[in-house]
Image (cartoon, helix red, strand yellow):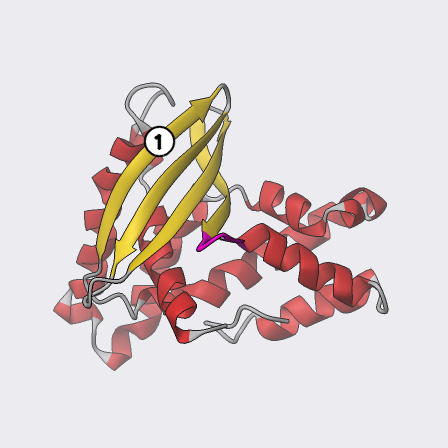
Amino acid sequence: MTRRRRQAWAAWIIALAVNWGAVNSVWAESIIAQIKSTVDHVVQILKDPRLQRDAKVEERRQRLRQIIAPRFDFEEMAKRSLGQHWQRNAARKDEFVPVFTRFVENSYVSSIESYKNEKILYTRERVDKDFAQVDTKVVKSKGDEIPINYKLHSVGGEWKVYDVVIENVSLVNNYRSQFNRILATASFDDLIKRLQEKTPEAGRVGL
């Protein structure tokens, strides 16, 4: 993964930290408005001097996880990432999803800490029944723009993210490609083991 794309991951995680819990209905306000309403909350945590000390790293990351985790539909993300292998291993869904969830959370939580006040522009919102997409651009300090699109669906009255597309590269497609490559020569147990082994290494995307 290039440095530019790694920086983009950090920016989209910031923008993904949406406090939908305060919204009683998915139609109460636009999805963009929901996203904007809590970005400041995340940035506040990152800028809190008390939480910037080395001794506070774990506390800071835990707070960020608490904001990020509820905003994803990790089961849907896992399903789409496994593709054809999801049904083949349906009996092990309850085992795989928690491992996948921890992997995704830990892979990106440290990237958030590299956020340097990049400007996030919310350019378009599209809704088609229970599915939606929010298009954004992250503007770097030198003026470079990175397009980041969020794919969401309505789950129990909340909008949840199931994929993110950065510069035309889908997170789900990226994982699916890796999982297919692994499962072509290894077992499902091997895939789970690899995810577990990589979980402590925050900031890693590949397997």
At 51% from the left and 76% from the top, the residue drawn is: 201
Q: In which quarter of the image is residue 5?
A: bottom left
* 146 or 70, nearer to the observer: 146
Residue 202 is inside the magenta segment: no
At 65% from the left and 45% from the top, the residue drawn is: 80
Q: Residues within 10 Å of mark 1 (few under 14, many from 20)?
A: some
> Magenta segment range?
166-170
| Whole-percent x, y for residue 130 in the image | 51, 23
* 31 or 147, nearer to the observer: 147
Asked if residue 17 can be seen in this view, the reply is: no
At 43% from the left and 24% from the top, the residue drawn is: 127
Disc 1 marks a residue whose amino acid type is: Glu
| Whole-percent x, y for residue 36 in the image | 24, 40
Circle 1 sits on which residue?
A: 125
Q: In this view, which residue lies farthest toward the left?
A: 49
- Asked if residue 148 is positioned above or below residue 184 in the image, the reply reads above
Compared across the picture, whether 81 is left or right of 118 comes to: right
* 121 or 22, nearer to the observer: 121
Asked if residue 34 can be seen in this view, the reply is: yes
Q: Is the magenta stretch mostly helix, strand or loop?
A: strand
Number of marks in the rendered image: 1
